[in-house]
Image (cartoon, rainbow, N blue to C red):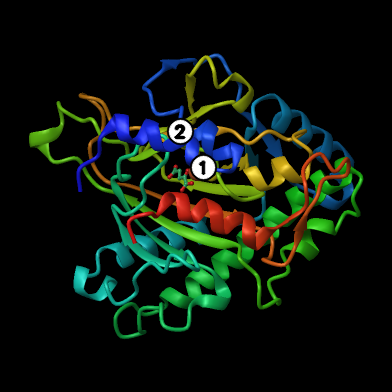
C-alpha cells in the first residue's frame, strides 16, 4: 500500500470526533524538551494514604498527563514472566499467529503493520496481540503451541486491572463520583467488558535501513481509553510524550524505561468523562537513531476501557453522553481502515 501525505491531510477533517482532528495534525518530528518532570507516585500502603495519593495523581495528571507508579504491588518477577511470554508469542511462526488474526469489530487478536495512525498515515512498524477477556474464544494459541501463555496473560491482565482501578478510584474521588464509580464501569464480570491487554513488538531495524528511517514505530496519538498502564523494558526506549495542552509547540519529552515503574497516561475517554479537566496526552514511539540500540522493542500496555454499555457523561455534562462502546468503535475504525 502507498501512502500519500497530502491525501492523508485532505481526509483528516472527515473525522467526526474532535480527538481525531487533533491527532491528524501531530505527525511531524517536532523538537525535544527534556525539562518536563515525569512524576513518580508511590502507591504503597494505598488504603491508608489514599487521600495523599489522589492529590499527587491529580496534580501529575493535570500538569503533564504522564506519570509513573512505583510500589504498585505487581512483583518484578510477574512483569518479567509476562514479557518472556510475549516474546515467545511473537517468536511463533507467522503461520501460527495468523490463526489468531486481529478482529476489527472487537479490536482483539494479532496484527502486523496494520495500524495506520491518523497522525502519520503510515503503518506502525510493529506487531501486536490484544486480549479482551470476553472475546478470546478462538484467539488463544493452544497449550501445545505456547504452554502457559493464556494463564500467564490472564493473571497479568487481572493484576494490571487492579492497579488501574486503584488509580481510577482516586480520580473518581477527585471528580466527585463515588470511589468505586470507575471500578463498576470496568466490571470484568460483565459480558461487555472491553478493557484490553496489548502485547507489543516493534521490529528490529535491519542494518540496510538504519540510516534512512522515515517510518514510526508508533505514530503520535492519544489513547482511546480512560487510563493506560504501560510496562517498558530496560534498554528499549523510544517512548516520547507531548502534553495535550502544549500540542501546538510539538516539543517531545522522552520517557525512558525505569525499572519496574509503570508508566501511566490519561486517555480520551477519561478526558471526556472529566469534562476535559484530566487531559489526555500525545505520545509516540520513535525509531532509534544512528548510534542507538537497533534491536527489537517489547512493551505491554493495559488499556482500562469502560464497559461497552457504560455511559460517558462528565459531572458538568460538557459533552453529550455517549456509550463507551460507540466511542471506541469510532476510534478503532479510524486506525484500522484497510480491512
Ligand atoms: O509501546 C509503547 O511504549 C507505547 C504503546 C502505545 O502508546 C499504544 O499502544 O497505545
Ligand atoms: Fe498509546
Q: Which residue does the image show at 41% across and 69% down from the upper left?
A: 103
Q: In the rendering, at what x and y percent does residue 166 appear?
A: 76, 53
Quadrant of image for the C terminus: bottom left
Rendered image quadrant of residue 54:
top right
Q: Which residue does the image show at 49% across and 30% down from the upper left?
A: 255
Q: In the rendering, at what x and y percent does residue 182 appear?
A: 78, 57
Tell me whether circle 2 and circle 1 mark residues in contact (CB < 8 Å).
Answer: yes
Residue 120 shows up from this direction = no
Left or right of 277? Residue 35 is left
Q: In the rendering, at what x and y percent does residue 332 appear?
A: 49, 55
Q: Which residue is mark 1?
A: 15
Q: Which residue is mark 2?
A: 24
Left or right of 137? Residue 60 is right
* 49 up-or-down from 188: above or below: above
Secondary structure beneath dot 1 equals loop
For marks 2 and 1, the one nearer the N-term is: 1
Secondary structure beneath dot 2 equals loop
Cα separation, mark 2 vs mark 1, equals: 9 Å
Q: In the rendering, at what x and y percent does residue 271 appear?
A: 70, 40
* 47 up-or-down from 220: above or below: below
What residue occupies the far left of the structure in this picture?
Answer: 208
Categorize mark 1 by other alpha carbons within 10 Å: few (<14), some (14-19), many (20+): some
Which residue is more in the foreground, 305 or 66? 305
Which residue is more in the foreground, 172 or 274? 274
Rendered image quadrant of residue 214:
top left
Left or right of 159? Residue 87 is left
Mark 2, ligand 2, within 8 Å: the answer is no
Number of the label disc, if any, that sits on residue 265: none
Which residue is more in the foreground, 266 or 148? 266
Amino acid at each position: 500500500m502507498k501512502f500519500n501525505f497530502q491525501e492523508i491531510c485532505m481526509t483528516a477533517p472527515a473525522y467526526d470526533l474532535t480527538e481525531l482532528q487533533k491527532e491528524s495534525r501531530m505527525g511531524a518530528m517536532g523538537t525535544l524538551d527534556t525539562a518536563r518532570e515525569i512524576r513518580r507516585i508511590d502507591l504503597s500502603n494505598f488504603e491508608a494514604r489514599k487521600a495523599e495519593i489522589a492529590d499527587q495523581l491529580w496534580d501529575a495528571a493535570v500538569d503533564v498527563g504522564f506519570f509513573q507508579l512505583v510500589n504498585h504491588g505487581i512483583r518484578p518477577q510477574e512483569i518479567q514472566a509476562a514479557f518472556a511470554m510475549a516474546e515467545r508469542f511473537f517468536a511463533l511462526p507467522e503461520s501460527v499467529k495468523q490463526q489468531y488474526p486481529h478482529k476489527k469489530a472487537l479490536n482483539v487478536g494479532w496484527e502486523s503493520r496494520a495500524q495506520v495512525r491518523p497522525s502519520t498515515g503510515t503503518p506502525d512498524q510493529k506487531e501486536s496481540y490484544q486480549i479482551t477477556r470476553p472475546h478470546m474464544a478462538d484467539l488463544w494459541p493452544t497449550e501445545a503451541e505456547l504452554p502457559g501463555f493464556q494463564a500467564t496473560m490472564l493473571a497479568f491482565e487481572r493484576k494490571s486491572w487492579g492497579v488501574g482501578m486503584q488509580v481510577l478510584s482516586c480520580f473518581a474521588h477527585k471528580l466527585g463520583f463515588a470511589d468505586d464509580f470507575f471500578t463498576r464501569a470496568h466490571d470484568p464480570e460483565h459480558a461487555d467488558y472491553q478493557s484490553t491487554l496489548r502485547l507489543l513488538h516493534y521490529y528490529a531495524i535491519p542494518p540496510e535501513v538504519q540510516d534512512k528511517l522515515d517510518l514510526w514505530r508508533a505514530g503520535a496519538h492519544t489513547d482511546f481509553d480512560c487510563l493506560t498502564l504501560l510496562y517498558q523494558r530496560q534498554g528499549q526506549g523510544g517512548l516520547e510524550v507531548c502534553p495535550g495542552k502544549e500540542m501546538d509547540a510539538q516539543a517531545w519529552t522522552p520517557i525512558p524505561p525505569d525499572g519496574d515503574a509503570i508508566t501511566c497516561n490519561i486517555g480520551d475517554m477519561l478526558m471526556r468523562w472529566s469534562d476535559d479537566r484530566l487531559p489526555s496526552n500525545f505520545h509516540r514511539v520513535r525509531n532509534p537513531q544512528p548510534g542507538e540500540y537497533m534491536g527489537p522493542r517489547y512493551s505491554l500496555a493495559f488499556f482500562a476501557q469502560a464497559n461497552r454499555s457504560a455511559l460517558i457523561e462528565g459531572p458538568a455534562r460538557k459533552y453529550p453522553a455517549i456509550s463507551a462502546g460507540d466511542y471506541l468503535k469510532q476510534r478503532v475504525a479510524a486506525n484500522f481502515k484497510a480491512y
